[in-house]
Image (cartoon, rainbow, N blue to C red):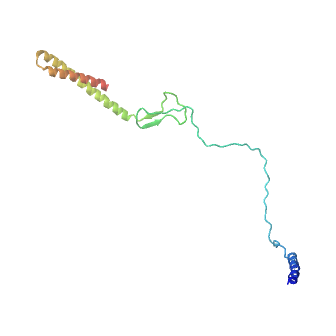
Amino acid sequence: MRARTSASVPIFSAALILAACGAPQAQEAPRGSPLPEVEIAVPISANLTDWNGYSGRFESVERVDVRARVSGYVKAVHFEDGARVKSGELLFSLDDRPFRAALARNEAQLSQAKAELVQARSDLERSETLRASGAVSLEELEQNRTRAASAEAIVAATE
């Protein structure tokens, strides 16, 4: 059996070599297909500046807060945003109707307080005159003095 195996090895090897030599080559591309197109770019020569971009915001060195001293409706604005303004310049105009109404109400209260003061002083003078004759009690005289002092205080507060 050995002779048979040893003779078959060279035959098998020769068959492999012949198969390898006679193997068909890799298939070539069909001759009818077009070649792919390739675009060519010309390089540009230029000076470049390195720079960095940062996000942020600007803020003024000096800051001014505008606060209203009174409440009311803004009637007009007398400046533009970002404009320079000087101390004492008019910035806003307010609707003055509520202020005029408050002034008229206070003037009426002052007139009423002055009229009550005149009445209280008159009652006090009368009480002092009648007290001398004994027609008015001491208690009523003191009440009239207190009422006159109170009327004077109301006038002062209203003014």
- Above or below for 138 versus 49: above
In the rendered image, which quarter is residue 62 located in? top right
Residue 23 on image: x %, y %: 85, 76
Q: Is residue 8 left or right of residue 99?
A: right
Q: Along the line of sight, which residue is nearer the eye, 115 or 21?
A: 21
Which image quarter holds the N terminus? bottom right
Q: Along the line of sight, which residue is nearer the eye, 44 or 79?
A: 44
Q: Is residue 131 left or right of residue 89?
A: left
- Above or below for 150 versus 73: above
Q: Is residue 138 left or right of residue 28?
A: left
Residue 12 on image: x %, y %: 86, 79
In the rendered image, which quarter is residue 119 located in? top left
Which image quarter holds the C terminus? top left
Q: Residue at x 18, y 23 (%)?
A: 143
Residue 51 on image: x %, y %: 69, 42
Q: Residue furthest front?
A: 2
Q: Along the line of sight, which residue is nearer the eye, 13 or 110?
A: 13
Q: Residue at x 29, y 27 (%)?
A: 110
Q: Residue at x 79, y 57 (%)?
A: 40
- Above or below for 151 versus 76: above
In the rendered image, which quarter is residue 135 located in? top left
Residue 128 on image: x %, y %: 16, 17
